[in-house]
Structures are given as structure tokens and as C-alpha cells.
């Protein structure tokens, strides 16, 4: 069952990556990529050294990744694809617990169905994989939700409540509409 799930996740990763690489360059991607590149190459900070009209966390992530690669757009889109893939993995795992009574096959099929519904959602299909501030904050927001649900099953939920709050704070620091 685990090899089947790994194969399924690999297929989702390949599909998300192929879809992201086929997208034309958007007129909005330059602002996020350029901010990360200016920070990585010249140490210039958003707001202080150049105008930046978004929250600051995405350029920090991109700057860290750009230190490893000279391919700015490719690297930024890979970050977005990785975030979408982790979101898919969390969604798959979230489906598992309440469906234990149905058996493993049903859990896997319904989890895969959840992923298909997620990635085929028109908003996700349009935004996912681009070098925008969508995939990373969506991951943080969904992680906050998963951690909050996990806290409910604990006798001492404090750490999970804290991590959930920190995760939604990271989402808001990446895209203000999550505040």
C-alpha cells in the first residue's frame, strides 16, 4: 500500500510540475522573483532598499532557494510546486483518520479523490505553480487547520495550538489576505 501511495504522490508531483512549467510567464511573477533575487544577490531588503507591495516572507524563502540556483523562475516555480504537493499530502493524510472504519482501500481512494478535487479546483488550477504568493500561504493556512484539528484530540493541546497560530502567522506574512 505504501509503494502505491508513493507512486500516486509521485504522479501528482510530476503532473503539478509539468503543469507549472507549461504556464506562460505572468505579469505578476516578476515582483516576487525580483525581490528574492535582489535579496539573494545584493542583500537588498524589501521596503528599505526597494519598493515591495506585499508581505515580506516570500522573498526570504526565494532568496534562500536562489542561493542554490541561478535559475530564478524555475526555482521559484519549484517552490510553489513543492508547497502544492505538501498541501496535497496533508490533505491525503487528513482524510485517513475519520475513514478508518471503511478500510484501507476506501481511505486511499477517497484521499486520492480529495487530491483530485483540490488540484482541479479552478482557483488552484489557475494559481498553483506560478511564482506568486499563493501556494506557500495556502500551505501554511491548511497546516494551521490540520494542527488545530490535531490539537482537539490531545489532552494537552497547547503546543499544537501554538504551532497552528504560528502557521497562520506565517501565512499572513506571506500573503496579507490570510490575516
Image: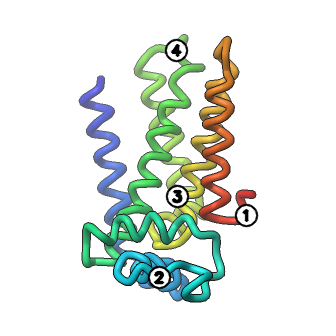
Q: Nearer the viewer, mark 2 or mark 4?
A: 2
Q: Nearer the viewer, mark 4 or mark 1?
A: 1
User: Compared to 32, does 92 lie above or below?
Assistant: above
Q: Earlier in the sequence, mark 3 or mark 1?
A: 3
Q: Label 4: few (<14), some or many (≥20) within 10 Å?
A: few
Residue 121 x/y as whole percent: 58, 57
Query: Considering the image in quadrants, where does the C terminus appear?
Result: bottom right
How many marks overall?
4
Q: Which residue corresponds to the image point at 64% horizontal and 38% vertical from the top-left? A: 164
Residue 30 x/y as whole percent: 48, 85
Q: Earlier in the sequence, mark 4 or mark 1?
A: 4
Residue 44 badge: 2
Q: Which residue corresponds to the image point at 56% horizontal and 79% vertical from the top-left? A: 46
Q: Label 3: few (<14), some or many (≥20) within 10 Å?
A: many
Query: Considering the image in quadrants, where does the N terminus appear?
Result: top left
**109 lies left or right of 143:** left
Q: Determine the CA span between mark 2 and mark 4.
A: 51 Å
Residue carrying label 1: 177
Residue carrying label 4: 100
Q: Return the residue nearer the eye: 156 or 112.
A: 156
Residue carrying label 3: 136
Q: Nearer the viewer, mark 2 or mark 3?
A: 2
Amino acid at each position: 500500500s505504501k509503494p502505491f501511495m508513493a507512486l500516486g504522490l509521485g504522479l501528482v508531483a510530476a503532473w503539478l510540475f509539468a503543469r507549472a512549467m507549461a504556464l506562460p510567464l505572468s505579469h505578476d511573477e516578476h515582483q516576487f522573483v525580483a525581490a528574492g533575487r535582489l535579496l539573494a544577490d545584493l542583500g537588498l531588503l524589501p521596503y528599505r532598499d526597494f519598493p515591495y507591495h506585499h508581505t515580506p516572507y516570500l522573498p526570504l524563502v526565494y532568496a534562500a532557494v536562489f542561493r542554490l540556483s541561478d535559475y530564478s523562475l524555475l526555482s521559484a516555480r519549484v517552490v510553489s510546486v513543492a508547497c502544492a504537493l505538501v498541501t496535497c499530502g496533508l490533505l491525503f493524510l487528513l482524510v485517513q483518520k475519520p475513514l478508518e472504519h471503511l478500510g484501507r482501500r476506501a481511505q486511499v481512494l477517497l484521499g486520492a479523490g480529495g487530491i483530485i478535487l483540490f488540484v482541479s479546483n479552478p482557483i488552484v488550477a489557475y494559481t498553483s505553480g506560478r511564482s506568486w504568493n499563493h501556494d506557500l500561504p495556502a500551505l501554511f493556512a491548511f497546516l494551521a487547520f490540520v494542527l488545530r484539528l490535531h490539537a482537539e484530540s490531545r489532552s494537552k493541546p497547547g503546543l499544537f495550538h501554538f504551532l497552528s497560530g504560528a502557521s497562520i502567522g506565517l501565512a499572513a506574512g506571506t500573503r496579507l489576505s490570510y490575516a
